[in-house]
Image (spheres, rainbow, N blue to C red):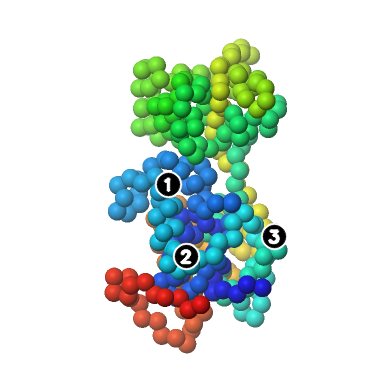
Amino acid sequence: MIHTDVVIIGAGPTGLFAIFQCGMVGLKTHVIDTLDFIGGQCTALYPEKPIYDIPAYPSISAENLIEQLKLQAEPFNPVYHLGQKVIATEPLDKEWVVTTNTGTQIQAKGIIIAAGSGAFGPNRPPLENIEQFEGTSIFYAVHQRKRFAGKNIVIAGGGDSAVDWANSLAEVANSIAMVHRRPHFRAAPESVSRMNGLVEAGKITLVTPYQLSAINGSDGHLKEVIVENLDGQKKSLQADVLLPFFGLQMDLGPIAEWGLDIEHKHITTAPHTMETNLPGVFAIGDIAIYPGKLKLILCGFSEAAIAAHTLRSKIFPETTFHFEYSTTKGLPTLQT
């Protein structure tokens, strides 16, 4: 049995900042995530995509944001348990025992759930033999643009991810074919306008209104993508790579069975403490909900601070805690 002050479930940006906030009030942390790397959706889905609403950063890539958060948390020596899923939480002597699918057991004085939207995975298009090409020619996220340099790419979807990556990859790809079932796109108007400019410049070819119908290739490498319109007319698109962006499947998984108050797949919390209906269990970030909730990373950062300070008061109720700004107190040293 491992003993610590706080177990943080989720190693996305909000979970990483919770490490720092817990450390600033003298709490040791262990962090659990189902992915085998930190960063959550920032790392898994859009590492190179710029984020514009992080304070003090006019623009920062998701990958760089995660790296900076990791560096900020390092002085507090967090212990990461990656590639593990929490399957059970049980109360024990006013504390909690958290168990993962690998048999890891951690006893903690409090739990902070920063699990984003829960476990997530891509909505796969219903194409025969698609699994034969996944990871070699079919990808549901772009981690490095340079991997797609000089390729003939087919992108399917009409939302922000599809349009944003079409605009970005048009700078390095040999060709981009944009497949969507409607001529209108759901992405941000500025992104659609930029895409239309690239269409006029011959950098992107719009294939609308069409849907994916079939794929052909061998040994995991695509040769063509077949698309079909509502009239049954088909056309072949030369393709080295297919990027289907049809959103994510969200699943709370075992979290839904822990006795938490759940509202539309979100955990209800008290906004002034971020505590759930279970004493000592907190929820922050996208998975938390309360009146007036905004799903922004910067709001998740604020919630991490609120949860950490509330937890510190609950763990050490007899100790007077004088609030200080980081500029005056510096970085505290945790007791081992």
The kind of residue tagged 2 is Ile
Residue 4 - label: none
Extreme residue toward the bottom, this view: 318
In the displayed structure image, the side of residue 126 where residue 271 appears, left or right: left
The kind of residue tagged 1 is Ala
Callout 1: SS: helix
- Disc 3: which residue: 102
Question: Closer to the camera: disc 3 or disc 2?
Answer: 3
Residue 151 position, x and y percent, is 50, 23
* Residues at marks 2 and 1 touching, judged by CB atoms closer than 8 Å: no
Dot 2 crowding, Cα within 10 Å, few <14, some 14–19, many 20+: many
Look at the image and tell me in which quarter the N terminus lies. Answer: bottom right
The kind of residue tagged 3 is Thr
Residue 249 figure quarter: top right
Mark 2 or mark 1: name the one nearer the start of the chain: 2
Q: CA distance from mark 1 to mark 3?
A: 29 Å
Q: Residue at x 65, y 27 (%)?
A: 220
- Above or below, 192 against 104 in this view is above
Q: Residue at x 49, y 59 (%)?
A: 15
Q: Residue at x 44, y 29 (%)?
A: 169
- Disc 1: which residue: 62
Residue 79 position, x and y percent, is 54, 65
Residue 89 in view here:
no
Residue 72 position, x and y percent, is 40, 61
Mark 1 or mark 3: name the one nearer the start of the chain: 1
In the displayed structure image, the side of residue 149 where residue 32 appears, left or right: right
Q: CA distance from mark 2 to mark 1?
A: 18 Å
- Disc 2: which residue: 19
